[in-house]
Amino acid sequence: MITKLSFALVAGFVVFGQALGQAKVTPANDPRGQLFRHAPMPKATRTIVVPLGPIQFAFDTENLRAHTVWHGKLDLYGPQYAHAKRPFIAQPNGVVLIENPPSLPWRLTKPGDQFNTNSPGIEGRFISTTTKGDVVTLRYQLLRKGQPPVEVEMTPRPTEGGFSRTFTLSPCNQSFWFLANRFSIDWDRLTHLHADGESARSFKIHTQLNYTELNITEAGAETTFNKTEVNEKAELHWIHIPPHDKPVTFRVTNTFPGLTHQSKDTPDEPQLKLGHVGSSRFRTRVGRKAPHYSIDFLPLKKEWELLVTGMDWLEDGRLAICTWPGDVFLLSGVTRGQSIEVRRLLSGLNEPMGLLVRDGKLYVSQKPELTEISFDEGDAVTLRRVSADWGYSGHYNAFSYGPVADRNDRFVLANAGHSGRWDMKFMGWGIRQGDEGVMTGISSGFREPNGISTFGPKRDIFVTDNQGHWTAVCELNHLRPDKYFGRPSATPDPKNLYGGRGKFTPPAVWFPYTLAKSVSGMTEITDDKFGPFKGQLIVGDFQNALLTRVFLEKVDGEYQGVVFPFLRGFRSGVNRLSFGPDGNLYVGGLQRTWACIAPDSASLERVSFNGATTYSVVKVVAIHDVFFVKFTKPAKPSAANPDNYDVSQFLYAYHAGYGSPRYNFQGEKNSQTGLHVKSATLSTDRKSVRLVVDGLKEEHVTEFKCYDIVDDDSNELWHVIFHYTLNRIPQS
C-alpha cells in the first residue's frame, strides 16, 4: 500500500527581477502542447523545462532542484530557433516565482538554522524523463554509501492558480528532509502548510543564506562563468519523510493569488502535434541528372522542421530521424515506394547531432547527454540518461556527435572543441562509454567533428573534422587511442597544452578546400547494390551540398587513402547519410545560419544506382614510388601514355590560424610541386594502370589529373581529378 502525504503552499505573486537584455534577436518559443524542453539556462546548462499552463518549471538535472519557476514563456535563442549564433542561452521570459539554491535539495539530517549547500552522505543521479499523454515524470536516484539507492519519481502538474509536484519515494530505512521552496524573508505573502498523516510533517526555517551561484552567459561559455554572491535572509520550506518500508507519496502545491491556470491563446499561436503529423511521397528531381545515379526528394511540410541531424533504421523498416530543433520522427513506408507516413515521436531535445538504433531503442547524442529513447505505439515515451560525463558550457557550438557502437558494442561519441573551454571535460575528444555512464577519453584534438561512423569488418571508427583554427582543411581521422588530431582540447589534456602543440597526428585523408568545405556524415558501402564501390566510404559536405567517395588502405598499420568527387546538387546542406534496407542511400540535409549553396532549409533525398556502371577510377593504391590506378572498365591504350597524367604534391601548414593554403616543396604559398610521371603501364585486362612517379614525398597530398583516359566506347572518366593523402610511402 502506498502512503500518501499532501502539503499545500500559498505564496504571493511577486516580481523577482530579471533583466533579459536580448533585444537585438527575436527569440523563439515552444508551441502550445510542448511537454518538455532540454535547454541551457542562466542557472544550469543541463536544464529540463516543463510547461505547466502559463507556468514554466525549470529542473536542474545535476542538482535535482527546481532552480527557477516563472509565469511566462521560455525564450529560445541560437541558430536553429532564432537564426542567429548569438545569444544562445535560453532565458525565462516573465515573472520569476521561485528560485532555489544550487544544492541537492535532500538531506539525511534535520536542517538547522544555518543552511549548507552541501548534502553530506548523499548524492543524486538523474535517471529519466517519461511522458504519457500530457503528463511528464522525472526520475532520479538518491545514493548513500553502502545502501541501496532510493528511487524518486517527481511529476509536476498545473493547478488552479499555481502548480504541484507529486513525489514518490521507494522504501528507505532512514529519514529524508526535502527542501521544497526558498522564499525571501521580506516577501509580502500568505503561506499555509499542512500535512496529511501523523508520521510526516512540514516546517519552515528562517535562515541566513550565504552561497555562490553560477551566472551562465554567452561570454562565460567561452571563458569563465561569472558568479553571483547570495547573502540574504530567507524562509526555507522543508518536508520530513520518515523511514518507510513501502513506497511513499507526497505532494507539494504552490498557489499564487491572481494567477489563473489557463493562459489566453492567441488565434495564430501554433499547437504542437505529436503522433501522426502527415504524409508525403518521394518525387524525381527535375533538372540535370547524374548519368548513373538517380536522386529523388521527399517534399517536406514546413511545420515538420525536418532539419536532419541523425538517421537510422528500425527492424520493421521505419526510418528514425532526429532534428536540430530537437524533434524525433518515425517515417513509415520509406523503402516501399508508397505514401510515407510521418510520426512525430517527441519534441524538446537539446540539439541532438546523431541517432543510433539498437534493440528497438533509439540512442541520441544531445549536447548535455547521451539519451536512450524507448517508446510504445501509443503515447508513452521514456528518455533515459545513459551518460552526461562531459563538460557542457551551454555554448551554441558545444555539439556532441554520435553515437556509434564500436566492435565491443560500446557507445562512442565525438565532442566539438571549437569555442570550448579547457575546464570543460572532454571538449574536443573522442570518448567511449564505460560502466555507470562514466566516459573514457580515446583521443583529443577535434574541432568540429560533424561525422562519426564505423568502417570495415573490425568496425574501426572514423571521424570527420572541419576546417578552422588549427585545422588546415577538412579531415577524415581514424579514431584510435592516445592520438592528438590538432585542435587544442579540454581536460584531461594538460592545461599548458591548451595554447597549442608543435605537431599532431595527420588525418587518413585531407579533403581539398576546392572540393569540400565542411565535411559531415559518412557511411560505408557494404554491398554491390550501390555500384562498383563496395568497401568504400561516402562522405557528405554541408557547405557545397555534395557527396565525396573515399577509398582507404593501410600502410605500416595506419590508414591513408584517396578522395574522389561523387554527386552534387542536393537540395540542402548534406549532413547525414544512411543506407536503407533497400540498398539506396538516404541523404538528410539542413541549413540555418551557416552558409550553404543549396536552396532549401531542410531535405531528405534518396540516391539510387541505376545499374549502368560508370567509367571511373575505383581506387588508387600506393606502393613505393608507384601508384596503381584501377578503373571500372577497360581503358583504351592511351591510358599507357605518361603524358596523360598530371601529378603534383603539396602540404598544409599546421598553425593557430584559420585553415591553410597549399604549400609546395619550397614552402611557397598557394603552390604545389609538379612531379615527373616516369612511366605508365597498362595491365593485361586494361582495367588498371601502373604509374611510376619520381620525387614523391611523405606527409603530402598527391593530386592527380587525368587526360584522354577513355573506355572502349570513348567515354571519359566520370571524375578526372582526385587526391591521395600520402602520409607514408609503402616500401613493399
Image: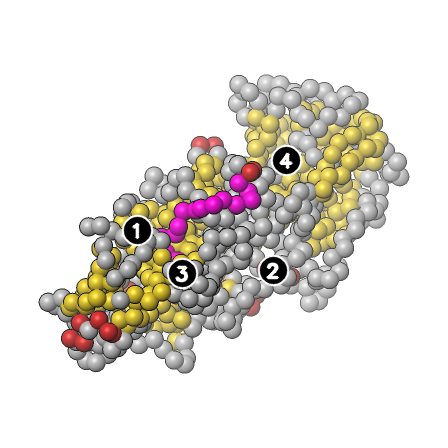
Which callout, 2 or 4, points at the residue further toward the start of the chain?
4
Q: Is residue 501 magenta?
A: yes
Q: CA distance from mark 4 to mark 1?
A: 52 Å
Judging by the rendered image, the residue that carries numbered circle 4 is 64
Judging by the rendered image, the residue that carries numbered circle 1 is 728
Residue 32's place in the image compared with 422, above or below, is below
Tell me the tag on residue 465. Answer: none
What type is the residue that disc 3 sits on? Gln
Judging by the rendered image, the residue that carries numbered circle 2 is 79
Q: Are marks 3 and 1 in contact (CB under 8 Å)?
A: no
Q: Are marks 1 and 2 in contact (CB under 8 Å)?
A: no
Which callout, 4 or 1, points at the residue further toward the start of the chain?
4
- Element at label 3: loop
Which callout, 3 or 2, points at the residue further toward the start of the chain?
2
Magenta segment range?
497-510
Q: CA distance from mark 3 to mark 2?
A: 43 Å
Residue 465 seen by the camera = yes
Q: Are marks 3 and 4 in contact (CB under 8 Å)?
A: no
**Residue at x 36% of width, y 78% of height:** 289
Mark 3 against mark 4, which lies toward the viewer?
3
What type is the residue that disc 2 sits on? Pro
Residue 192's place in the image compared with 355, above or below, is above
Mark 3 against mark 1, which lies toward the viewer?
3
- Element at label 1: loop
Q: CA distance from mark 3 to mark 4?
A: 60 Å
Residue 372 seen by the camera = no
